[in-house]
Amino acid sequence: MFALLNARRGRRWFGSMAAQLAEGIMARNRTALSRAITLMESTHPEHQAEAKQLLSRVVSRSTTMDADSRATSIRIGIAGPPGAGKSTLIETLGLHVVRSGHKVAVLAIDPSSVRSGGSILGDKTRMTELSNHKDAYVRPSPSRGTLGGIALHTNEVILLCEGAGYDVVLVETVGVGQSEVTVTDVVDCVVLVLPPAAGDELQGVKKGIMEVADVVVVNKADGSLEPLAKQARSEIRSALQFLRPKYPQWSPQVLLCSAKENRNIGTIWDVVKQFKATREADGSLFEQRGVQNKTRMWSYLQDEIMRRIRDSLNSSHKEDLLGAKLHEMERDLMDGTTTPRVAAMEVAETLVPLRRHMHLHAQEITDSNKTH
């Protein structure tokens, strides 16, 4: 998958890759967008450095816009349990939206194997008509162990898609049900898709994804399942009355649809547009994106700290105090002479003097520069 990134490893090539891909994205080039996303998802250190430059170039184009202009796109999370028909609904909805004059990007998150780390990435094969549409872009991505139903770099990929001119971004979550709440950190509107029988399984309605849903869609409301779908809609509406509203200006809508028969798809899109207009009217949509950015920063910071801690664990440098402490705690844990909590606290205490040492070293450099 990374052959295009590894084809030319020279410093000259890497120095210009970010600029070339950013230019291609702004020119609405789908190939450049695909390569940029591949770069963004790579774990190679050189690729990560290029990805940082690429993202800065793409995002910088929007910094001159005012708040209203920057919130013109709509980011929609499609969540729900397996078998609810999310992929079918996304294709039908996506086709409806592109025919309405929009450009649609679909980011389909697939679960990764806990043993091999691989993913099937089969969602694109289930959206053949949408994948071939000139105004649509479908990109499967592996979750790679990230919890919450989305992939680690979903937020950055959304920004790249918007930079390429896609004003509607649909994010299909892994499909694990009640725990898919992390999607709220990257999208504007959460659409929860449920099968007709879901009305009988509302015992956990006060937890997880139901609490963060802005629109609830009972899919497969056709044929013999239509009565069950109507019953589920009634039960879901009753259950939502006991939940605190996510936003004071919006009450979650519960809709029926049949993605297979293309029924009420337009209604779903109309409700999403109504949601967007309501949130934009008081500026809360743009404010929410700022809050999401801060949340994701802390998430990335946590990942980066853990990555550096693991690097210390693998370090052979004699002066690496953190690595030495990690090895010591791992040995004690294997011997049963300490507990995981105590070991974690010991490692955390080792980080404090390291941080102070780094601060003092930085201060010495600053003082030295001032004297010169």
Image: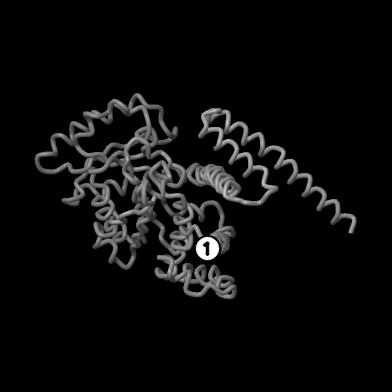
The image quarter containing residue 13 is bottom right
The image quarter containing residue 120 is bottom left
Find residue 157 and report its horizontal and vertical position in percent. Answer: 45, 57
Q: Nearer the viewer, residue 180 or 263?
A: 180
In percent of the image, x 56 and y 55: which residue is there? 66
Query: Which quadrant: the C terminus?
Result: bottom right
Query: Which quadrant: the N terminus?
Result: bottom left
Disc count in the image?
1
- In the drawing, does residue 23 fall left or right of residue 106? right
> In the image, is residue 219 above or below residue 63?
above
What SS does tag 1 mark?
A: helix
- In the drawing, does residue 355 fall left or right of residue 228? right
> In the image, is residue 71 above or below residue 210?
below
Find residue 290 and report its horizontal and vertical position in percent. Answer: 54, 45
Q: Which residue is label 1 attached to?
A: 47
Q: Nearer the viewer, residue 30 or 2?
A: 2
Find residue 284 and report its horizontal and vertical position in percent. Answer: 50, 42
